[in-house]
């Protein structure tokens, strides 16, 4: 088992690849009460078109299968796995994102029993047509509940207006129409293609002995005679231009909600995603953050309230910026933001203070096993190790960050998305 010590943050990472191909990472945290374990497959909502493991032709699956499959793996012929973990004193959960599905638990004791249960749950699927039909009804209600929320509707509307073909325009849970196309056969096809050890990562952080935990996990792995197979995903073709430059929907809101979505091509730059992500977030914080003069000017002018915010999303196949908030004057707010982007000057001292603050928060975050486990896999799937962040923060410069921002922000690639009061 490979061992690497990171002196800047006083953490040790153990890494090994098991015989069946599963990648295993362990971080021992002596003195910690909680242990956090995740088992993650590189399969998310974007992976709708692929070549199944047992075929040679590309297939297309309905939107929402990855999320649906996440739900179904908790249900076994013998009962609900939530009850098993509860009886063993563990809190269990799962989530599906654009590029991965992760199953996780946290526990203070019976860690080995819970690891066995987690592996069994993920490695032994059980789907029947009857249970699939039941789940369709449950997830349909979940989708309806989200659709009633204005912020969700605005976000979904914006992505659909920004993107022509990219599957990011579809909600992670899919639509009521798409989930009704899912069958047990669909789930088994996706499971046997993506839930393969060589396409998965397991992560353990807590007061554990690495060698013993690695042996336990290795013993629990199902043996298979199948050759290793990494899923072949269809290439995604997406123009840089937005699909719709403006979209407005009358709905039940008391005052307008504005979201500006700007497509960028940061993922096409020949540089680490982790560096680009930090550069973009630092510049956005200087431009629009709550500590900026511009933010307080907008607040004083009554153009924004505490709902105002922004985000930058960077994934291997897409990247975009979102700026949103409720406002009585959406046209004026949009104009002010565009002017800010075009004429902004940046202060080196403010930038260095922001980097220093982020570095402190990053170091402090290692007191949280939840943060370590969830963020580690995300960075790993994007080609980086979580502990590399310290090096990135030490090397980052304002000049390069501004260059990245100027390259990313093209106002001609912007969608103006609004919800407005009826009438």
Image: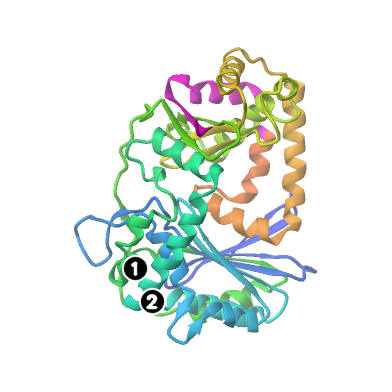
- Could you say where residue 108 lies in the image, as x and y percent from the top left? 73, 75
Q: Answer above or below: position of 9 versus 261.
A: below
In the displayed structure, does residue 66 sit left or right of residue 214? left
Who is closer to the viewer here, 52 or 166? 166
- Furthest-front residue in this view: 423
Q: Residue at x 77, y 68 (%)?
A: 32
Q: Is residue 399 magenta?
A: yes
Quarter of the image that includes the N terminus: bottom right
User: Which disc is residue 280 wearing?
Assistant: none
| Vertical placement of residue 163 versus 367, above or below | above
- Residue drawn at (35%, 30%), measured in percent from left and top? 243
Q: Is residue 262 visible?
A: yes
**Residue at 44% in and 42% down:** 316
Residue 194 location (% of width, % of height): 37, 63
Magenta region, residue range: 395-423
Name the residue nearer the viewer: 146 or 46. 146
* Residue sticking out furthest to the left: 57
Dividing the picture into quadrants, the one containing residue 29 is bottom right
Compared with 341, 265 (above or below) is below
In which image quadrant can residue 14 be found?
A: bottom right
Residue 225 is left or right of residue 144, and the answer is left
Number of residues whose C-alpha sits closer than 10 Å to that of mark 1, classed few (under 14), some (14–19) or many (20 or more): many
Q: In the image, what residue occupies the spot 77% across and 71% down? A: 33
Q: Which residue is mark 1?
A: 187
Of callouts 2 and 1, the N-terminal one: 2
Question: Residue 279's quadrant in the figure?
Answer: top right
Residue bearing the label numbered 2: 131
Numbered disc 1: secondary structure: helix
**Residue 170 magenta-drawn?**
no
Q: Residue furthest bottom?
A: 78
């Amino acid at each position: 088992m490979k061992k690497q010590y990171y002196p800047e943050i006083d953490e040790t990472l153990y890494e090994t690849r098991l015989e069946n191909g599963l990648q295993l990472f362990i971080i021992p945290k002596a003195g910690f009460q909680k242990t956090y374990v995740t088992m993650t497959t590189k399969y998310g909502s974007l992976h709708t078109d692929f070549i199944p493991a047992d075929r040679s032709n590309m297939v297309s699956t309905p939107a929402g299968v990855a999320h649906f499959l996440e739900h179904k793996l908790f249900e076994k012929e013998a009962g609900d796995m939530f009850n098993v973990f509860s009886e063993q004193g563990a809190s269990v959960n799962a989530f599906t994102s654009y590029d991965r599905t992760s199953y996780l638990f946290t526990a203070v004791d019976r860690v080995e029993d819970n690891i066995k249960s987690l592996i069994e749950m993920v490695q032994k699927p059980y789907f029947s047509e009857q249970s699939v039909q039941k789940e369709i009804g449950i997830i349909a209600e979940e989708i309806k509940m989200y659709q009633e929320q204005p912020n969700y509707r605005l976000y979904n509307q914006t992505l659909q207006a920004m993107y022509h073909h990219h599957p990011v325009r579809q909600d992670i849970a899919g639509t009521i129409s798409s989930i009704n196309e899912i069958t047990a056969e669909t789930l088994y096809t996706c499971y046997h293609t993506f839930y393969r050890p060589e396409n998965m990562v397991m992560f353990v952080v807590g007061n554990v002995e690495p060698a013993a935990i690695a042996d336990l996990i290795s013993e629990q792995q199902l043996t298979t005679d199948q050759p290793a197979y990494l899923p072949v995903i269809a290439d995604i073709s997406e123009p840089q231009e937005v699909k719709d430059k403006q979209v407005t929907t009358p709905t039940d809101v008391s005052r307008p909600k504005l979201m500006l979505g700007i497509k960028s091509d940061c993922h096409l730059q020949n540089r680490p995603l982790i560096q680009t992500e930090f550069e973009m977030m630092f510049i956005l914080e200087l431009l629009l953050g709550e500590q900026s003069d511009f933010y307080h000017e907008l607040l004083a002018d009554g153009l924004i309230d505490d709902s105002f915010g922004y985000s930058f999303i960077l994934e291997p196949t897409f990247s975009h910026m979102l700026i949103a908030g409720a406002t009585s004057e959406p046209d004026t707010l949009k104009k002010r933001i565009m002017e800010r982007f075009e004429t902004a000057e940046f202060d080196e001292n403010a930038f260095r203070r922001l980097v220093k603050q982020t570095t402190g928060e990053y170091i402090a975050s290692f007191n949280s096993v939840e943060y370590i486990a969830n963020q580690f896999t995300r960075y790993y799937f994007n080609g980086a190790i979580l502990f590399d962040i310290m090096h990135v923060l030490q090397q980052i410069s304002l000049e390069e960050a501004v260059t990245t921002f100027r390259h990313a922000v093209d106002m001609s690639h912007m969608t103006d998305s609004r919800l407005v009061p009826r009438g």
